[in-house]
Amino acid sequence: MHPLDSIAVWVPGQQSTCVPQAPTGVVFPCDEGVPRAGFRDDTNNFAPRLGFAYDLTRDGRTVVRGGYGLTYAFAIFNTLQEGQVGIPFAIRDVLVDLPFSKDSQGLAGVLLAGWQVNGIATFYSGLPVDVIGARDDNLDGRAADRPDLVGEWQTSRPSDDDIVAGATWFDTAAFAPPGVGQIGTFGRNVISGPDYKNVDLTLSKRFRLKGSHELQLRLEAYNVFNFTNFINPIGNTTSKDFGEITGVVAPRILQLGARYSF
């Protein structure tokens, strides 16, 4: 067997002919009918992408760009990490030249001209939560098996305070380990984690110096509205924190900067 063909695939009742010592049901790409990637090509995924750019003032000074798309992870990620990624809706790169005394001369021109605001806004729904265990229940050689669904996992969204206090994102009692040699009944990417909201803003001021020399001062604010963005809940069914959210993405960050161009 080629080293690159070592991905194990579970096919109930089939005995591997190229690795005969493998348990019944565990087959490999070297066996007849087993694709080398471990799964057959799926041509049913519709993945449209749409983008736009609009010049609000028709002079290149105020431009709004945005886009939306659906994509699917590369095959290697689907195989090894079993993840699926959807690109969110986002409004990006809004650049506005503030119209403060553009034609002013002297001190007024120095103080009032050359101001810019640049922003990036991103909003998307939650990423998939991969619910798996840490045991090889189905005997496929991988200790990352999906559980059986034995109840209703959906619950109302806990409040932010409840999440901090340890409330679970879903009902963890709805899952149980599958039987030995069995594949869990719970599907992939069924549960979605918390949504994400973020707005970054930059306020900058240009000072034109002699010739082509220019000094730019910048005030940058990341997550300017200080949205609370939680990470995904723990999806490992054997973890003591199963179902809980144990962290957040960075809060608001402010920084000052300067750039000298020549």
Image (tube, rainbow, N blue to C red):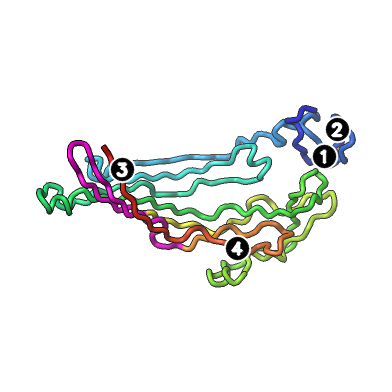
Measuring from the top left, give residue 88's x and y in whole percent. 48, 49
Q: Earlier in the sequence, mark 1 or mark 2?
A: 2
Please identify the dominant SS of the magenta region. strand
Q: Earlier in the sequence, mark 2 or mark 4?
A: 2
Which picture quadrant has residue 133?
Answer: bottom right
Rendered image quadrant of residue 244: bottom right
Q: Which residues are magenta?
A: 201-227
Q: Amino acid at mark 3?
A: Tyr
- Within-10-Å neighbours for mark 2: few <14, some 14–19, many 20+: some
**Quarter of the rendering occupied by the N terminus:** top right
Q: Which residue is the site of mark 3? A: 54
Image quadrant occupied by the C terminus: top left
Asked whether 49 or 5 is in front, the reply is 5
Q: Is residue 207 left or right of residue 28?
A: left
Mark 3–mark 1 Cα distance, whole angstroms, equals 54 Å
Q: Is residue 14 magenta?
A: no
Pointers 1 and 2 in contact (C-beta within 8 Å): yes
Query: Which secondary structure lies at badge 2?
Result: loop
Looking at the rendered image, the disc whose residue lies closer to the viewer, 3 or 2, is: 2
Q: Are marks 1 and 4 in contact (CB under 8 Å)?
A: no
Q: Nearer the viewer, mark 3 or mark 4?
A: 4
Where 76 falls versus 245 (above or below)? above
Foreground mark, 1 or 2, reads 2
How many dots with numbers?
4
Q: Which residue is mark 2?
A: 19
Residue at position x 60%, y 63% in the image: 246
Give the amino acid at mark 4. Answer: Ile
Where does label 4 land, which residue? 245
Q: Label 4's element?
A: loop
